[in-house]
Structure formats: structure tokens, C-alpha cells
Image (tube, helix red, strand yellow):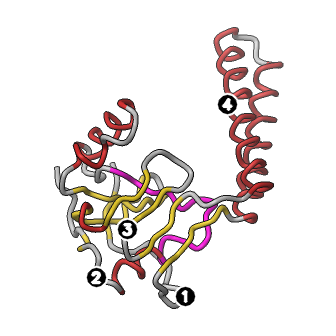
Amino acid sequence: MGRWSNTVPGEAFLSPVTERIEFRYSPKGQLVLMALGCLLVAGAWFLATTHPDIVYRTVAWCCVGFFTLCTLISAKRLITGGVPFVFDLSGIAFPGGNFGLVPWSEIEAYAVVTIRGNHFLALTFHNPDRVLSRVTAAKRKWALTNQRLGWGHWALSFTGVAPGMNEAIAFIREHSLVQALEEPTR
């Protein structure tokens, strides 16, 4: 289960707040993800070629394919860069996807959710049906499942992205855009 808070544990706010923040894929973060992907591919490859059990070998070959794909995605992001999301005074924009702009007026609250050491910025919407109508049915179901688990409707990951989550929280607080949740709603 996840843990909720209003900041990332152990981190301070690092930069001054502006009227717009672009969160870009971090070259350093992408290199770390690529190195981790290579290690996981090597480990899965070793298991796939040396384990006597066919079930383990089959699962290991699936892992080789999955982690190779993940490593290639990190390599693409390293080469081409990109902006997964932008915070500005009108809302959160997702230039690379079909979500578009989510106005601050549609966001009821936010919280930092920690799941197995990974931090996410969880957003809870006033009217999730209207906001989530722009995404695929599978993503809508996933979002509603997240909400039932107490993790908000939509979660933003800042892994491999710069600036980090604390700048996003500082932006929200500075402009009094959304209130923070102290406890998850279940």
C-alpha cells in the first residue's frame, strides 16, 4: 500500500518558482535507467540460457524482451529528449499524449504517494468522468482503480525527469492552485 504526504521525504525545494515549468526527460536519469535496463537484460538472459526449468526460461525470455524495450525507450528519450508534462498557470499540459490540458479548476487535490520507495504526484479530480473521457478505456479503468486504492485518479512519475517533484509541489503551493490531501480518500 502507498503512503501519502505533501513532500518527498528527505528533499528540500530546490529552485525558485516561475509561471511555467517544463519537465523534460533528464539525460542523467535516462542514462541511469538505460544502465539498469542493461543489467536486468543481462540477468534475465543469463537465467534464460542457464536455468534447467522451462518455465523459468520462458519467463526469463519474456523479461529479456520487456527490459530490452524499456532500455530502448530510455535511449530514445536520451537522444530526442522531450517534455512529458508542463505546469503553468492554466493547468497541467501533456504535450506528448492525448490527455491535453488539465485545468487547475478540474483538480480537487494532490498528494505525494510513496509505493515501495517510488514517489508519485497523485492528482484527484473534481469530475473524473469528464477529465478521463480524453484517455483510452484501459487508462480510465486504471485511473478509477488507483482512486479506489486511495492513490488519486492520475499519478505523475518524476523518474528520469528534471526538474523534480519538489519543484512541481512548490509551483502548486506558490500559486495556491490545488489543496494538498493529508489522508488518502478510500
**Residue identified by numbered label 4:** 66
Q: Is residue 168 above or below residue 183?
A: below
Reply yes or no: does residue 164 show up in magenta: yes
**Residue identified by numbered label 2:** 176
Q: Does residue 170 appear left or right of residue 76 in this picture? A: left
Name the kind of residue labelled 1 in the image.
Ser
Q: Does residue 157 appear left or right of residue 152 in this picture? A: right
Q: Earlier in the sequence, mark 4 or mark 3?
A: 4
Q: Nearer the viewer, mark 4 or mark 3?
A: 3
Q: Residues within 10 Å of mark 3 (few under 14, many from 20)?
A: some
Q: Nearer the viewer, mark 2 or mark 4?
A: 2
Q: Nearer the viewer, mark 1 or mark 4?
A: 1
Q: Secondary structure at mark 4?
A: helix
Name the kind of residue labelled 3 in the image.
Gly
Q: Residues within 10 Å of mark 1 (few under 14, many from 20)?
A: few
Q: Name the one closer to the observer, 167 or 53.
A: 167
Distance from disc 4 to disc 3, alpha carbons, whole Å, reads 34 Å
Q: Cβ–Cβ below 8 Å for labels 4 and 3?
A: no
Q: Name the one closer to the observer, 177 or 155.
A: 177
**Residue identified by numbered label 1:** 15
Distance from disc 2 to disc 3, alpha carbons, whole Å, reads 12 Å
Instruction: Residue at 31%, 44% (x, y): give it.
Output: 132
Distance from disc 1 to disc 4, alpha carbons, whole Å, reads 36 Å
Reply yes or no: does residue 5 show up in magenta: no
Q: Earlier in the sequence, mark 2 or mark 4?
A: 4
- The boundaries of the magenta stretch are 154-167
Q: Cβ–Cβ below 8 Å for labels 1 and 2?
A: no
